[in-house]
Image (cartoon, rainbow, N blue to C red):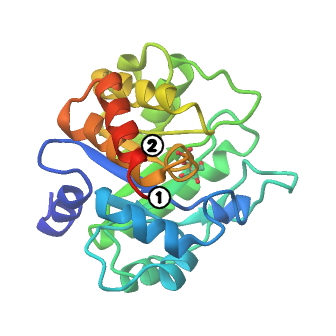
Amino acid sequence: MDWGKQNRMDRIIRPDGHTLMLAVDHGYFLGPTSGLEKPRKMIMSLAPYADCLMPTRGVLRNCVDTNIDIPVVLRVSGGTSVIGKELLHEGITVSMKDAVRLNVAGVAFSIMVGSEYERDTILGLSQVVDQAEEYGIPVVAVTAVGKEMARDDRYFALASRIAAEHGASIVKTYYCDRFERVVDTCTVPVVIAGGKKLPEMEALEMAYKAIEAGAAGVDMGRNIFQADNPVAMIKAVRAIVHEKATPREAYNILKANSRKKK
Ligand code: 5RP
């Protein structure tokens, strides 16, 4: 791998092989979602505890300080919204030239395997990979999942492998039972999304089980920024990702930090 791309990968996935990516891209299809109504304040308070930030270009330009020392994986897919008819039909929303201008460490693109629009989204991923490879930029493929799809290891292994086969350098997918199968059959590192807000202990258990199953880390959003105390929550997740903390130990970190002033 060329130095530039390897350097970007090394900045996203830390030397211990793990990463805590902070997903704050939700506005691109959800608008001002709870916790990110004022993105700057939330992002700047959480960034010191994250290894990587995943925003849209709008949030990056308008709400993130330029002197921040954190790699950025930029969301480059979208074009549909939660109130539209076709949420599972995203296309390319950012040129690679603009991604380079924004000094990104990686770009993120969603594919919708098994949906009516899987072909468009997989071809979109291939196009983004072609463009990104020219500059040595890793692509994080996100395996988005529709309501009608089975959220099991068979589906996520299939979708993740398809993403890797089309050139993704990292796959972001969802945790499920028998997650080892998803990780073991994917030829690139796998990170999990957090999904909808869960009770904090459940989110910590999910992160723990994903790491135990071989995931490189988490790319978590709502379960961090919608927590009662987001800073305490990201510290707890960080302990699981980088310090081998058990869910109980992480929960204790969450509680101890929750007592401190928010
Ligand atoms: C959509 C996404 C989200 O925008 C986001 O990154 C997911 O993060 P979380 O589920 O942890 O809130 O990837 O497909």
Residue type, mark 1 in image: Ala
Report the front residue among 24 and 150: 24
Confirm or reject: label 2 Cβ below 8 Å from ligand 1: yes
State the quadrant of the C terminus: bottom left
Residue at which label 1 appears: 108
6, 195: nearer the viewer: 195
Image coordinates of residue 186 in percent, x first then y, are 35, 30
Q: Position of residue 37 (x, y in %)?
A: 66, 68
Q: Provide the residue designation for mark 2.
A: 172
Type of residue at label 2? Answer: Lys
Query: For the point 37% across and 22% down, which residue is it?
Result: 209
**Looking at the picture, how far across and down is residue 109, in whole percent?**
52, 56
The vertical placement of 76 against 113, above or below, is below
Q: Confirm whether residue 53 shows in the render.
A: yes
Quadrant of residue 179 within the rendered picture: top left
Q: Secondary structure at mark 1?
A: strand
Label 1 beta carbon within 8 A of ligand 1: yes
Q: Is residue 145 left or right of residue 126?
A: right
Choose the circle earlier in sequence order: 2 or 1.
Answer: 1
| 29 or 198, nearer to the observer | 198
Compared with 221, 193 (above or below) is above
Q: Are marks 2 and 1 in contact (CB under 8 Å)?
A: yes
Tell me, for residue 173, which label it has, or none: none
Percent of width and height locating residue 208 = 35, 26
SS at circle 2: strand
Q: Residue at x 53, y 53 (%)?
A: 225
